[in-house]
Image (cartoon, rainbow, N blue to C red):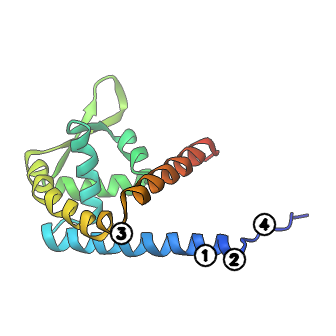
Amino acid sequence: MNATPRWLTPEEQAAWDGFIRMQEKLIGRLSRYVQADSRMSAADFIVLAKLTEAGGRMRFMDLTNLVEWEKSRMSHQVGRMAKRGLVAKEECPDDGRGSFIVATPAGYQAIEGAAPLHVEHVRRLFIDALTKDELDTLTRISSRVVAHLDAQPD
């Protein structure tokens, strides 16, 4: 026998709907801008951003987990990026099944060209819409939700 669902109250539904709508509009707009500005997909951008923030080299599974993607999605994305010369895949000498993903010079050049434009869009579309107190509150809320998610079983 199934337990009765804990339906959302009107206030909870409004908060959830507002969050989802904001996230979809913001990510959609930023993705289109990245594509228009740099000819990179949003997926290219996130992979290169995370790689270069980590020093340009990460284990495949660490990168996959960091961006919360399925292994197959990351594998296909890395393959497409490697064909364009943005990343390279290196075998891991101490783990025969593992590999490293490495940002190439072309990958560094691509992210260095895209990042300044991206941060201006983030500032204009998101940061400038909020007060300092609102940003502080959003930071606390986001941290709390991420910690809650991390404590949940996959």
Secondary element at image label 2: helix
Q: Contact, CB < 8 Å: mark 2 with mark 1?
A: yes
**Front-most of residues 108 and 17:** 17
131 to the left or right of 89: right
Residue 61 rendering spot, x and y as whole percentages: 39, 41
- Count neighbours of disc 3 (C-alpha within 10 A) and say few if under 14, some if 14 to 19, many if 20 or more: few
Q: CA distance from mark 3 to mark 2?
A: 25 Å
28 to the left or right of 19: left
37 to the left or right of 91: left
Q: Earlier in the sequence, mark 1 or mark 3?
A: 1
Secondary element at image label 4: loop
**Image-quadrant location for residue 45:** bottom left
| Residue that carries the numbered disc 1 in the rendered image | 14
What is the total number of numbered labels drawn onto the structure image?
Answer: 4
Residue 30 rendering spot, x and y as whole percentages: 28, 69
Q: Is residue 111 positioned above or below 13 on the image?
A: above
Circle on res. 27? 3
Report the mark closest to the observer, 1 or 3: 1
Q: CA distance from mark 4 to mark 2?
A: 12 Å
Residue 108 rendering spot, x and y as whole percentages: 12, 48
